[in-house]
Amino acid sequence: MAFVKQQFGNPSDAAVGNLPTLYHYWSTADTVATIIASAYFDDLTDSVVAGDVIYIKGSDTAEYVEVTSDTGVTPVTVESITGSAGDAVTYVAQATSVGGAATEVFTAAGVVATDVVSAVLHTVGAAPVTITSAAAGAGNISVVFSADPAADHVVNFIVVTP
């Protein structure tokens, strides 16, 4: 089969500064190995950037990959996050902001300060804010928003242990 653009999406409704963007892609016709193959995502050459993360659900399994090619360059290449570099996805979660301050700390069992965090807004609240940074701590993730997010912004997290 071939790449089907309608099956590719970004769960974030807002731009998130310089943080990697988390996308998802599903295919009932292609295996993850086929999807990860070079040039599968060439239709996205102007949409994805190096460092973006794609959650792939294939006909056989699911996997997180990182875009390794630059914007505008073909072929668009990806590499398994759990691949040869030894990196591993160690935490995936969704949390709702509680509000009260621009910085919020979310509990994240098993996360350590040396982990790498990708945080994207899944749902933007009534008074929209953006994420300006996210950092791992001992058992938590600290997120700095552009302003107080109130109690209605939903954040998706992917944490990778290098």
Image (tube, grey):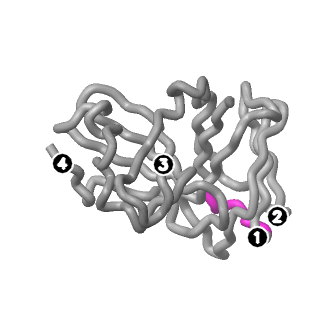
- Determine contact: label 1, label 4, CB under 8 Å: no
Is disc 2 surrounded by few (<14), some (14 to 19) or many (20+) residues within 10 Å?
A: some
Per the image, the residue denoted by label 1 is 146
Q: Which quadrant, please, contains the N terminus?
A: top left
**Residue 39, above or below 72:** above
- Disc with the residue nearer the chain's start (3 vs 4): 4
Query: Which mark is on residue 67?
Result: 3
Of the residues shown, which amino acid type is indicated by label 1?
Answer: Ser
> Which residue is at 26% across, 35% downward?
34
Q: Residues within 10 Å of mark 3 (few under 14, many from 20)?
A: many
Q: Residue at x 35, y 38 (%)?
A: 36
Q: CA distance from mark 1 to mark 3?
A: 26 Å
Which amino acid, by three-letter code, is at mark 4? Ala
Label 1 and label 4: CA atoms lie apart by 39 Å
Q: Answer with mark 2 or mark 3, whichever residue precedes in sequence.
A: 3
Query: Mark 2 or mark 1, which is nearer the start of the sequence?
Result: 2
Q: CA distance from mark 2 to mark 3?
A: 30 Å
Residues shaded magenta: 148-154
Check residue 102 in the rendering and tell me which mark sits there, or answer none.
Answer: 2
Describe the element under mark 3 as helix, strand or loop: strand
Which-is-in-front pick, marks 2 and 4? 4
Q: Which secondary structure is most common in the magenta stretch?
A: loop
Q: Residue at x 60, y 24 (%)?
A: 86
- Mark 2 to mark 4 CA distance (whole Å): 43 Å
Number of the label disc, if any, that sits on residue 2: 4
Q: Which three-letter amino acid code belongs to the residue tagged 3?
A: Val
* Of callouts 2 and 4, the N-terminal one: 4
53 over 37 or under it: above or below: below
